[in-house]
Image (cartoon, rainbow, N blue to C red):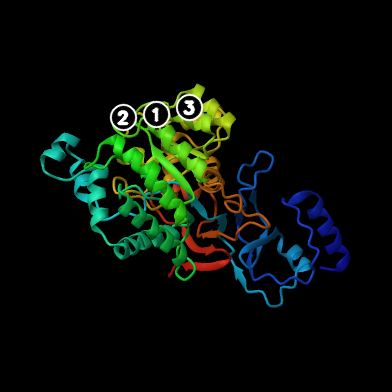
């Protein structure tokens, strides 16, 4: 292309076409990676009538751990020195931001496969009558019995499979220890998985303290709440083991006054807040979430439209998990359309846990669309930008200059294939912080 045509071409794109417009003051900058000519790039930077910033005819330049630019290849070749840049030809593929899975219980001991299988044909009471340990208490026993090394190994294996399914950031909760010793053990596992991420291919990990997940059988409820307030939260803070504090408010779990006490104490100590709210009953959890302005309120099966408006006004992200509703055959599935109508920002998450073992955000998107009336675009946005908002991480979830280069490549020709091919893993390669951490062997 002659210089004159190139200049007018650049003017044209700079003026009108490809958000975000990027003025490069360092023309000799050398990108460390260039993903050239994908069929589609889903930036998740919304444009007019386009929630997911779906671009054709662009390439993506990466500089170190961050995304440098999104523009047509001739434009990038003009703006940067590509002579030393590794160029990956991704023709026929789709590029998307890595998924941000903002609600998981990925660290746990043992498995509840016996319980899950028995429940296919039996009631919960019949399963218990068979002598099969069930629920959070069963996982507590197995998690307490596991060593820190065993928990690191089993969680790392799950996290690695999540990475291969396109997830580049995972939130991980404690909550199966339910004592000072074992809650700290779970959070140290999180900490080791954060560190491991620098040397082994794992997603980035965000740690959440969920001591208030259930009551341990050996203590009174009041004693345990006091232990959370006076011993666990200060210890977690002192060791810097978690960014978030979360509480499970529900029938048989934490009451509204107990939840308020734990969250207000955590906030005073500097934790960011989350809440498991309205999953099996409306105990005021979602209203408390709006009042306290927590970062996210999760589940929301019984939340009323009035409260959804309060959550939207308070900027609380709603985290929805279609596959846990499926796994437990929830009698009252959440109403995503009502939440969208109320103006809420929504995130999708796996909620991987011993009661609902799901590692794939693609499957989550498929169920969100077919079962809960998300559009494919809304599902992708909730699985990326929504997840990042639910974790208060403005540096990821979209493909835009300056954000982390957390990118996945899908071996499909059009975006909608990801919600169409039920149960498939369409991911061909994954980059975390600009480094390729997974490539499928064909
Ligand atoms: Zn949960």
In the image, residue 262 sits, relative to residue 421, either above or below, namely above
Badge 1: residue crowd in 10 Å (few <14, some 14–19, many ≥20): some
In the image, residue 413 sits, relative to residue 52, either above or below, namely below
Q: Is residue 420 left or right of residue 177?
A: right
Q: Position of residue 4 (x, y in %)?
A: 88, 64
Nearer-N-terminus badge (1/3): 1
Seen as rendered, the residue at the extreme right is 4
Identify the disc placed on residue 293: none
Q: Is residue 29 left or right of residue 218?
A: right
| Disc 2 to disc 3, C-alpha distance | 16 Å
Name which residue lies at 82% across and 51% down. 15
Which tag is nearer the camera, tag 1 or tag 3? 1
In which quadrant is the C terminus drawn?
A: bottom left
One can see residue 123 in this view: no
Q: Position of residue 359 (x, y in %)?
A: 38, 53
Nearer-N-terminus badge (1/2): 2
In the image, residue 430 sits, relative to residue 44, either above or below, namely below
The answer to the question of whether label 1 and label 3 lie on touching residues, with beta carbons closer than 8 A, is: no
Identify the disc placed on residue 287: 3
In which quadrant is the N terminus drawn?
A: bottom right
Seen as rendered, the residue at the extreme bottom is 84
Name which residue lies at 57% across and 63% down. 433
Q: Quadrant of residue 340?
A: top right
Which tag is nearer the camera, tag 1 or tag 2? 1
Query: On the image, numbered disc 1 is attached to which residue?
Result: 256
Q: Is residue 178 left or right of residue 131?
A: right
Q: Position of residue 119 (x, y in %)?
A: 20, 40
Nearer-N-terminus badge (2/3): 2
Query: On the image, numbered disc 2 is attached to which residue?
Result: 251
Q: Quadrant of residue 196?
A: bottom left
């Amino acid at each position: 292309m002659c210089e004159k045509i190139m200049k007018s071409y650049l003017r044209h794109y700079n003026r009108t076409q490809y958000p975000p417009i990027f003025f490069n003051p360092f023309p000799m900058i050398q990108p460390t990676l260039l993903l050239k000519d994908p069929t589609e790039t889903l930036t998740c930077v919304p444009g007019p009538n386009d929630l997911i910033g779906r671009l054709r005819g662009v390439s993506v330049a990466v500089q170190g751990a961050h995304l440098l630019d999104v523009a047509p290849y001739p434009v990038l070749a003009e703006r940067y020195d590509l002579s030393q840049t590794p160029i990956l030809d991704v023709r026929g593929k789709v590029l998307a931001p890595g998924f941000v899975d903002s609600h998981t219980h990925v660290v746990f001991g043992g498995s509840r496969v016996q319980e899950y299988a028995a429940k296919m044909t039996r009631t919960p009471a019949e399963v218990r009558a068979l002598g099969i340990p069930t629920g959070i208490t069963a996982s507590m026993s197995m998690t307490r019995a596991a060593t820190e090394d065993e928990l690191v190994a089993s969680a790392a294996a799950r996290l690695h499979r999540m990475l291969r399914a396109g997830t580049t950031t995972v939130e991980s909760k404690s909550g199966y220890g339910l004592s000072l010793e074992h809650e700290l053990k779970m959070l140290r596992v999180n900490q080791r998985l954060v560190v491991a991420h620098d040397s082994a291919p794992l997603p980035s990990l965000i740690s959440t303290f969920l001591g208030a997940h259930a009551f341990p059988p050996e203590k009174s409820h009041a004693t345990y709440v006091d232990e959370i307030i006076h011993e666990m939260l200060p210890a977690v803070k002192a060791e810097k083991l978690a960014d978030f504090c979360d509480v499970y408010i529900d029938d048989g779990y934490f009451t509204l006054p107990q939840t308020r006490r734990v969250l207000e104490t955590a906030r005073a100590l500097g934790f960011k807040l989350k809440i498991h709210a309205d999953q099996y009953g409306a105990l005021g959890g979602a209203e408390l979430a709006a009042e306290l302005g927590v970062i996210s309120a999760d589940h929301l099966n019984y939340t009323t439209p009035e409260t959804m408006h309060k959550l939207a006004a308070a900027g609380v992200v709603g985290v929805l998990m279609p596959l846990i509703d499926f796994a437990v055959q929830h009698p009252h599935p959440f109403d995503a359309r009502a939440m969208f109508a109320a103006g809420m920002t929504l995130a999708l998450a796996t909620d991987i846990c011993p009661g609902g073992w799901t590692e794939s955000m693609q499957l989550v998107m498929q169920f969100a669309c077919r079962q809960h009336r998300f559009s494919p675009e809304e599902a992708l946005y909730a699985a990326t930008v929504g997840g990042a908002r639910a974790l208060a991480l403005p540096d990821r979830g979209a493909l835009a200059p300056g954000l982390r280069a957390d990118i996945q490549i899908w071996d499909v020709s059009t975006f909608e294939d990801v919600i169409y091919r039920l149960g498939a893993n369409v991911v061909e390669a994954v980059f975390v912080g600009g480094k390729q951490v997974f490539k499928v062997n064909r």
